[in-house]
């Protein structure tokens, strides 16, 4: 059995012998092409006219795609009569996730489960995030041909303190706010046509939260004029949040090889493998008049399913 090391040595020897025989303006770039040993062997048997055709087509390929890009990602496939099928399996990528919280607390009035502005406010926050983050990514990765942001999941948090509320009652109030925020987020995601919208809904956090309330006007102040002690103990348990997770895709899709005939029954193609960029994401925060949106810990990492479907079609 031929050892892998010996096979690679033979492949390198064959390629280093045949590559300089191709007349091209970019010999060093040609030498860096990815190739199989079968392609190298086939190319070594091409006629002089066929090798000239390979060189001419390679010059065009470099001029269309750039010398550096071809050197990093280029591949040649060569054979007689018919090229073997290209390996179109993409290298699996890791998800690039970030999560954000839209703080809707200020949008709801006291004991109100709905807000007249929540649909537009949520739409504005998500839209502004996508627009600004994409603009940043385009500056960071100018070579990328694909920059997109897709949804992975979302979670609604709608809690009240345990201070009794007669109208409509704490549990009902939490349900109303949950429904308002969920409806607003789904509507925004769908209207903006975000890939993967609206994403998986994670288990909601809703209902009463925090310590039990015991009426004590001396300690907390009378109703309508509560003091700092009251807010410290019960205020943090009144929460109205939308937390959503996105998957960020930044890449150069592959360029599949187009079979080109040589002088006789020689055939060849040039292609570029896909490039996925290693992404760094600076912190992100948006402040609006009535509410704010800020980066938060990713609750559940994952892929945007729309990216996987699109990737498989490339």
Image (cartoon, rainbow, N blue to C red):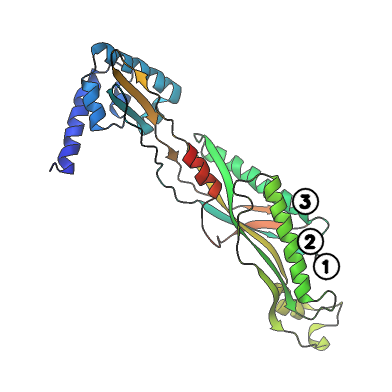
Q: Secondary structure at mark 2?
A: helix
Secondary structure under tag 1 reads: loop
User: Between residues 247 and 227, which one lies in front from this camera angle?
Assistant: 247
Residue closest to the far front = 81
The answer to whether residue 141 is above or below residue 125 is above
Does residue 212 lie above or below 167 as drawn? below
Residue 138 visible (yes or no): yes
Sequence order check, earlier mark of 1 and 2: 2
Q: Is residue 276 left or right of residue 55?
A: right
Residue 288 screen position, x and y as percent? 74, 53
Q: CA distance from mark 1 to mark 2?
A: 10 Å
Residue pointed to by mark 2: 107
Report the Cα–Cα distance between label 3 and label 1: 18 Å
Q: Which residue is mark 1?
A: 112
Foreground tag (1 vs 2)? 1
What crowding class fits label 1: few (fewer than 14 Cα within 10 Å), some (14-19), or many (20 or more)?
A: some
- Give percent across and percent down for residue 27: 29, 21
Percent position of residue 137, x then y: 56, 42
Numbered mark located on residue 120 in the image: 3
Which element type, helix, strand or loop, lies under badge 3? Answer: helix
Q: Earlier in the sequence, mark 2 or mark 3?
A: 2
The answer to whether 278 is drawn above or below residue 74 in the figure is below
Q: Residues within 10 Å of mark 2 (few under 14, many from 20)?
A: some
Quadrant in the picture for the N terminus = top left
- In the displayed structure, would residue 259 be above or below residue 243? above
Q: Is residue 182 left or right of residue 2?
A: right
Q: Residues within 10 Å of mark 3 (few under 14, many from 20)?
A: few
Cβ–Cβ below 8 Å for labels 2 and 3?
A: no
């Amino acid at each position: 059995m031929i050892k892998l090391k010996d096979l690679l040595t033979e492949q390198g020897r064959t390629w280093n012998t045949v590559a300089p025989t191709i007349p091209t303006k970019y010999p060093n770039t040609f030498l860096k092409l990815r190739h199989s040993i079968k392609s190298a062997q086939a190319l070594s048997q091409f006629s002089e006219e066929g090798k000239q055709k390979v060189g001419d087509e390679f010059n065009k390929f470099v001029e269309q795609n750039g010398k550096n890009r071809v050197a990093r990602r280029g591949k040649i496939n060569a054979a007689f009569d018919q090229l073997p099928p290209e390996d179109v399996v993409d290298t699996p990528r890791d998800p690039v996730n970030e999560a954000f919280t839209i703080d809707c607390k200020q949008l709801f009035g006291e004991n109100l489960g709905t807000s007249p502005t929540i649909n537009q406010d949520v739409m504005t926050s998500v839209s502004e995030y996508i627009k600004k983050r994409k603009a940043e990514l385009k500056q960071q990765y100018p070579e990328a041909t694909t920059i997109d942001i897709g949804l992975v999941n979302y979670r609604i948090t709608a809690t009240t303190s345990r201070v009794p509320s007669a109208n409509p009652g704490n549990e009902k109030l939490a349900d109303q706010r949950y429904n308002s925020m969920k409806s607003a987020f789904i509507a925004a995601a769908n209207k903006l046509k975000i890939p993967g919208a609206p994403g998986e809904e994670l288990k909601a956090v809703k209902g009463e939260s925090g310590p039990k309330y015991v009426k004590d006007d001396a300690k907390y102040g009378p109703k309508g004029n509560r003091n700092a002690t009251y807010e410290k103990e019960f205020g943090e348990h009144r929460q109205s949040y939308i937390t959503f997770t996105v998957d960020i895709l930044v890449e150069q899709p592959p360029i599949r090889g187009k079979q080109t005939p040589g002088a006789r029954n020689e055939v060849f193609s040039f292609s570029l493998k896909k490039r996925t960029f290693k992404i760094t994401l600076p912190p992100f925060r948006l402040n609006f008049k009535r509410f704010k949106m800020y980066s938060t810990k990713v609750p559940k990492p994952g892929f945007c399913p729309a990216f996987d479907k699109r990737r498989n079609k490339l």
